[in-house]
């Protein structure tokens, strides 16, 4: 079960392929949960009971709202864990991901930061340009 812990922890580093794979796994978990939620809560029998007046619509709406809130919190943590690992590769703290909590402005700032840092070498993947140029001059 070490691989589950490795997937859930934001404390390590992850390469590009691992990051993509982790995001795909996160998306698959989220999609399966949403599919199961609609399959369990909103069934044909429930819809028939709602239209006949046997079940209060507010109870169904509340259960859907709370389910989506729970799924959203779990999904946000899973995404945070993956992005935090990737931010460590560009020498940034995972706190930078908290910019996404600011509506619209946070997403724009985070996108600008990530795009502007695409050429910044990571600690273990690319050497600094100055070191590279010094080696070329030798």
Image (cartoon, rainbow, N blue to C red):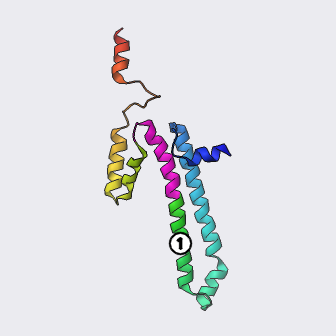
In this image, 48 relative to 138: left or right? right
Extreme-bottom residue of the structure: 53
Secondary element at image label 1: helix
Residue position for label 1: 66
Q: How many marks?
A: 1
Q: Which residues are magenta?
A: 75-92
Q: Which quadrant of the figure has residue 57?
A: bottom right
Q: Position of residue 101 (x, y in %)?
A: 38, 58
Q: Is residue 41 above or below residue 7?
A: below
What secondary structure predominates along the stretch shown in magenta?
helix
Q: Is residue 78 magenta?
A: yes
Q: Is residue 46 magenta?
A: no
Which of the image's four quarters has the C terminus?
top left
Q: Which residue is drawn at the image coordinates 52% and 38% (left, top)?
A: 14
Q: Position of residue 87 (x, y in %)?
A: 43, 41
Q: Position of residue 2 (x, y in %)?
A: 65, 43
Q: Position of residue 124 (x, y in %)?
A: 47, 28
Q: Is residue 33 above or below residue 60?
A: above
């Amino acid at each position: 079960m070490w691989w589950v812990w490795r997937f859930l922890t934001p404390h390590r580093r992850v390469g590009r392929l691992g990051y993509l794979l982790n995001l795909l796994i996160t998306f698959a978990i989220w999609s399966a949960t949403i599919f199961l939620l609609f399959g369990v809560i909103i069934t044909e029998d429930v819809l028939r009971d709602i239209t006949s007046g046997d079940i209060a619509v507010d109870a169904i709406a509340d259960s859907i709202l709370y389910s989506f809130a729970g799924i959203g919190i779990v999904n946000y943590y899973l995404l945070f864990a993956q992005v935090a690992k990737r931010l460590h590769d560009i020498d940034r703290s995972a706190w930078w991901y908290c910019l996404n909590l600011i509506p619209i402005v946070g997403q724009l700032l985070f996108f600008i930061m990530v795009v502007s840092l695409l050429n910044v070498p990571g600690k273990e993947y690319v050497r600094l340009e100055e070191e590279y140029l010094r080696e070329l001059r030798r």
